[in-house]
Image (cartoon, helix red, strand yellow):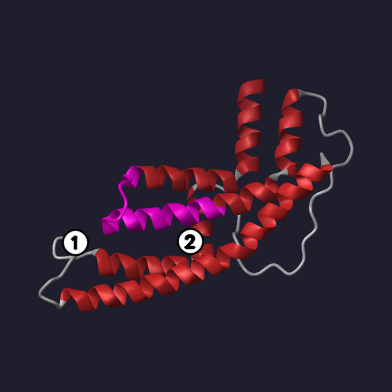
Amino acid sequence: MQGLVNFASYIGYCIAVLLPTFCYLAASGLFLFGAWAFWVQAQPDNPYRHRPWVPFVSLVLCGVFASFDKFLTMANGTAGTNLNVSIAALTSYTPPQVGGNVLGNTPGDAIVNVVDLFQSFFQPFGAFACFWAVLAWWSTVNGRSNRSQTSCLVQFIFGVMLMNIETITNFLVQEFTA
């Protein structure tokens, strides 16, 4: 079990290291795209004639990706938790240790213990899911994706739920064991 926990933790660590890079690359790309879209709107062959909001949305999402940790913290506050998100570069990491009785005394204890062990994977993966949901929403608004805006919202909500997996697990265990 310790090997699986270490593997999942290191994958979560890699995601946590790559997420700031992807956020800043997306912010830079959206800024350049927004500037290009404003320039293109002045041209006679404007591809965004029927979607004049595309450059504005791109610049707003540029700011979202530049301060993505604050955006995720606000989303967690809206979800009712006080989880503060930090996507700064990590310098040291140790995976959680499996110790004692992982199974606990009841099946609910076992579920909570396993979720606690894999929380270092679930939280970065949830933040990454939120990143891709916002990027997919931009491509939907831009007209480059065939997804619906509702599916992007559902993906974002599930990403926030993954970041708060311990709170949700404790709630579900209490609901189903009562």
* Circle 1 SS class: loop
Where does residue 35 sit, x and y in percent of width and height? 30, 77
Residue 125 visible in image: yes
Q: Residue furthest top?
A: 178
Q: Earlier in the sequence, mark 1 or mark 2?
A: 1
Percent across and percent down for residue 122 are 63, 47
Residue 71: image tag: 2
Q: Is residue 139 magenta?
A: yes
141 sits left or right of 121 in the view: left
Name the residue furthest front.
45
Q: Residue at x 54, y 54 (%)?
A: 128
Q: Which element type, helix, strand or loop, lies under badge 2?
A: helix
Please give the residue where the numbered disc 1 appears in the rendered image. Answer: 51
The quadrant the C terminus occupies is top right
Mark in the foreground, 1 or 2: 1
The secondary structure that most of the magenta stretch takes on is helix
Q: Which residue is pictured at 52% across the width and 48% down the height?
A: 160
Amino acid residing under circle 1: Arg
The alpha-carbon separation of the residues under discs 1 and 2 comes to 26 Å
Instruction: Classify 25 as above or below 155.
Output: below
Whether 83 is drawn above or below 39: the answer is above
Residue 170, horizontal then vertical, whole percent: 66, 35
Q: Residue furthest right?
A: 100
Please state the extent of the stretch shown in magenta in the rendering. 127-150
Mark 1 nearby-residue class (10 Å; few <14, some 14–19, many ≥20): few
Specify whether residue 54 is painted magenta: no
Is residue 101 depicted above or below 165 in this figure?
Answer: above
Specify the quadrant of the image occupied by residue 114: top right
Query: Disc number at residue 129?
Result: none
